[in-house]
Amino acid sequence: MTNNLDSLLHKLESQISKHENFNLQVSQSTVGWQIEHSLLTINGIVNAIQQSNPKDYKWKFSFIKMVVLTTKKIPRGKAKAPKIVVPKTEINKDDLQLHVNTTRETIKGLETVSEDHFFPHPYFGNLKKKDTIRFLEIHTKHHLDIICDIVS
């Protein structure tokens, strides 16, 4: 189930050597920032879903959730990253590699939660496990696309 997420994590890892690259026409952030933000997001969401209580799940319609999960695209520049997933320190190659390794272990935790565990997304509302994984894939791909545009 997390094979696609593993593959995307590998693609993030392959960009670590370009962590200092930037292109202000694409983003105010470096490649390293994009990688670190993606890793912080994955780790934070996996932790949140593991901590969730399926009995507390409440469904709520969200148009933006429907659009993003259906199109598998996040519009650029439309949302601001929550502070908890904004990198706070200087980003270097070694730290990024360690964080990728930690994240690789973290995503294995998705295998131990039930389909009814959920992540409370700040814009989409509660996402059950299947939609949480789909969101993580879409979000990671979004930042890989930005990285690709920065380095091209």
Image: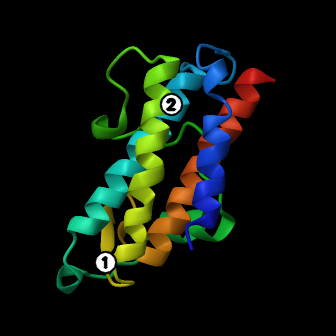
Q: Secondary structure at mark 2?
A: helix
Where is residue 60, by image quadrant?
Answer: bottom left
Q: Tell us which disc is closer to us: 2 or 1.
A: 2
Residue 86: x percent and y percent? Answer: 36, 32
Amino acid type indicated by mark 1: His
Q: Is residue 59 left or right of residue 92?
A: left
Residue 137: x percent and y percent? Answer: 58, 58
Alpha carbons under labels 2 and 1: distance apart: 29 Å
- Res 128 seen here: no
Q: Which mark is residue 145?
A: none
Q: Residue 51 or 128: which is nearer the viewer?
A: 51
Residue 4: x percent and y percent? Answer: 64, 62
Where is residue 1, by image quadrant?
Answer: bottom right
Mark toward the start of the polypeptide (2 vs 1): 2
Q: Is residue 135 left or right of residue 15?
A: left
The residue under the point 32% across, 73% down is: 118
Q: Secondary structure at mark 1?
A: loop
User: Mark 1 = which residue?
Assistant: 117
Q: Which mark is residue 97?
A: 2
Q: Residue 39 or 111: which is nearer the viewer?
A: 111
The residue under the point 71% across, 23% down is: 150
Residue 82 vertical position relative to residue 86 in the rendered view, above or below: below
Residue 50 vertical position relative to residue 77 in the rendered view, above or below: below
Residue 6 vertical position relative to residue 87 in the rendered view, above or below: below
